[in-house]
Image: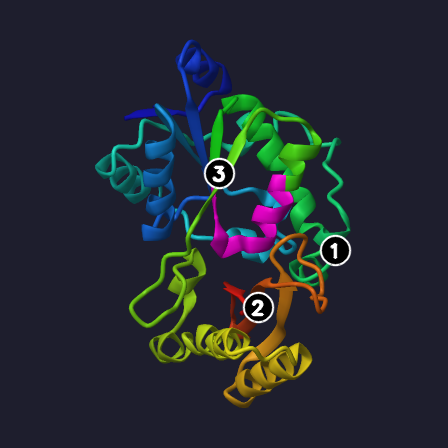
Amino acid sequence: MEIIKDVKQLRSYLAGKTRIGCVPTMGNIHAGHLSLVKLALRKSDTVVTTIFVNRLQFNQNSDFDRYPRTLNNDLKLLKEVGNNVVFCPDEREMYPESQKYFIDPPKIAKKLEGRFRPDHFRGVCTIVLKLFNMVSPDVAVFGKKDYQQLAIIKGLVRQFSMPIEIISGETIRERTGLALSSRNVHLSSQEKIEAPRLQGSMRLIYDAIKSGDRNFVAMEYAAGESLARHGWIVDYVVIRTQDGLLRPSNKDKKFVILGAASLGKTRLIDDLEVESP
């Protein structure tokens, strides 16, 4: 497995390679990331996993500083699954000068996660565009775990006519139902026991929709109330259309349940796709 930290070296190595896949990450690799790498390996000939903790998408420096950096272990895990290239530049390589040009994402970026993390998606879109320009992939894999991010990246690629196929990977969960996330390391042992309740509250909505219930507002309210009673600080639990993340109409059939809430000092997000009968 090649480990590359320099853009010029990366481009030189990839010159002439066919069907390049890209898996952008911020490191702290876990089974969820590895599932995306395995998917990329099936869909391409050379897989570049990028590891870069992007300061631009953090709203607070404390969150940026707190993000776990585990590069040595990341490299070990990626090598074990057959990843081809790890591109792990430092900040000076990614931002050789102060970034003055940014991607201005659409209105959906101001809602849901965007309400609680201002300019988060501006930072995400900007770094993803930079990485795509450096890697020049034919395929890029993103997880459904960050459902709103996935939707925005798909729109970015489509509107800028990039010749990149965006593939979505399913969320990988612990046996308890808790979605794997780099943030999970900050949960205390007691919080780890409580954390699956977020997915559980969303599963109740899933079951209700599958049974034909379309009283979406009541479902959202009940889920938020249940979490709050158990000590969560709830940002949102909502039902949106899979296409466009819009409020559902009577004609819609395909939905996604989106949730974000904090347990102690750790903010968790999750989602669940569902189709009504």
Q: Quadrant of residue 77?
A: top left
Residue 2 pos. (x, y %): 31, 23
- Residue named by callout 1: 110
Decide which of tag 2 and tag 3 comes sooner along the chain: 3
Q: Nearer the viewer, mark 3 or mark 1?
A: 1
Which residues make up the magenta segment?
142-154
Q: Amino acid at mark 2?
A: Ala
- Residue named by callout 2: 260
Q: Secondary structure at mark 2?
A: strand
Residue 270 pos. (x, y %): 50, 64
Q: State the residue at coordinates (68%, 79%).
A: 217
Q: Residues within 10 Å of mark 2 (few under 14, many from 20)?
A: many
Q: Tag count in the figure?
A: 3
Q: Are marks 2 and 3 in contact (CB under 8 Å)?
A: no
Residue 130 pos. (x, y %): 60, 29
- Residue named by callout 3: 52
Placement of 224 over or under 73, stated as above or below? below
